[in-house]
Each structure stands twice: as structure tokens, then as C-alpha cells.
Image: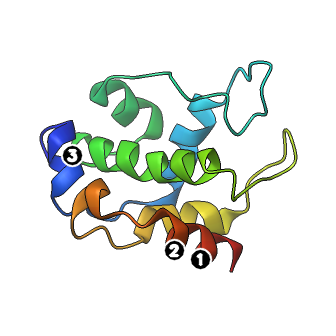
Amino acid sequence: MSSTLDVMRQEVPPVQPSYVLRYWCLLHLEPDTETSVSAGVGRSYSIEAIAKICGCPLSDALPVWARTTLLIIAFSTGNLSVKKDADLPQVFFDLAASVPLPHGLEGFNCDEFVQRLKG
């Protein structure tokens, strides 16, 4: 993966759940007036910064971004919620890190993903 366009159309490889958790936490360090789940939306970090903060190889940084984005999309639909300031269950990070994405984010089925998270 070399660009954001790649993760839109090409297979996104699985990553370690701990990388997704670290990036999620980075996005939610300073919650704004909204719920903590939506607070990180709109922030951006370089691929190099994501790799450094998550402790992952540079080659995993873009997939980490893409897979964390799955959680952001799932919460933005309104079909998934947690209590304000609640920790997300580990299964959320496990699934986001490993769910097959053979066609990148373009092929992502959010409804199916949310049902698996609620599972």
C-alpha cells in the first residue's frame, strides 16, 4: 500500500489489533464536546506519525489508518453506540484489525460490520 487511493480499491491486509487500539486512542485523547466516540473525526496524522505512535512498521501504518476508519464509519451511522467515555470492547479492535477487506474500503459493508460488532 502506498497511498490512500490504494486502500480504497485494493485489498487491505490485516494488522495487529493493538495498532488499531493505539491509533483509536490517539484520535480520542482530547474529546471535544461531543461523545468520545466521535471526537477524533476530522483529525489527521501522517503515515509516519501513525507508525511511530502505534509502534508498527511503516508498511502497516496505512492499513492501520484504514482499519481504524472502519470503526469511525460504524459509529457515524448511528447504529452503534457506547456510553460516553466508555472503553470499547477489545472485540471491536480485533474485528477492525482482521475483517477481510479484499476490495479495500470501497467494498466495505458497514451494516454487516456493525452486526458483527454487536454480535
> Which residue is pictured at 36% across the width and 63% down the height?
108
For the residues bearing labels 3 and 2, Cβ distance under 8 angstroms: no
Q: Residues within 10 Å of mark 2 (few under 14, many from 20)?
A: few
User: Which residue in the protein does label 3 denote?
Assistant: 59
Q: Amino acid at mark 1?
A: Arg
Query: Viewed as shown, does residue 84 lie left or right of 104?
Result: right
Q: Residues within 10 Å of mark 1 (few under 14, many from 20)?
A: few
Mark-to-mark CA distance, 3 and 2: 27 Å
Decide which of 48, 101 is in the foreground and name it.
101
> Which residue is pictured at 15% across the width and 37% down the height?
3
User: Which residue in the protein does label 2 denote?
Assistant: 112
**Of discs 1 and 2, which sits in the foreground?**
2
**Of discs 3 and 2, which sits in the foreground?**
2
User: Which residue in the protein does label 1 denote?
Assistant: 116
Q: Amino acid at mark 2?
A: Glu
Q: Residue 11: x, y in percent?
A: 19, 63
For the residues bearing labels 3 and 1, Cβ distance under 8 angstroms: no
Residue 94, by quadrant, is bottom right
- Tell me if I can see residue 19 in this picture: no
Mark-to-mark CA distance, 3 and 1: 27 Å
Query: Viewed as shown, does residue 117 lie left or right of 109?
Result: right
Residue 55 versus residue 82 in the image, above or below: above
> Which residue is pictured at 86% across the width and 40% down the height?
84
Q: Residue 69: x, y in percent?
A: 45, 45
Q: Quadrant of the C terminus?
A: bottom right
> Which residue is pictured at 69% across the width and 59% down the height?
79
Q: Earlier in the sequence, mark 3 or mark 2?
A: 3
- What SS does tag 3 mark? helix
Q: Amino acid at mark 3?
A: Ser
Residue 93, by quadrant, is bottom right
- What SS does tag 2 mark? helix
Decide which of 16, 41 is in the foreground and name it.
41
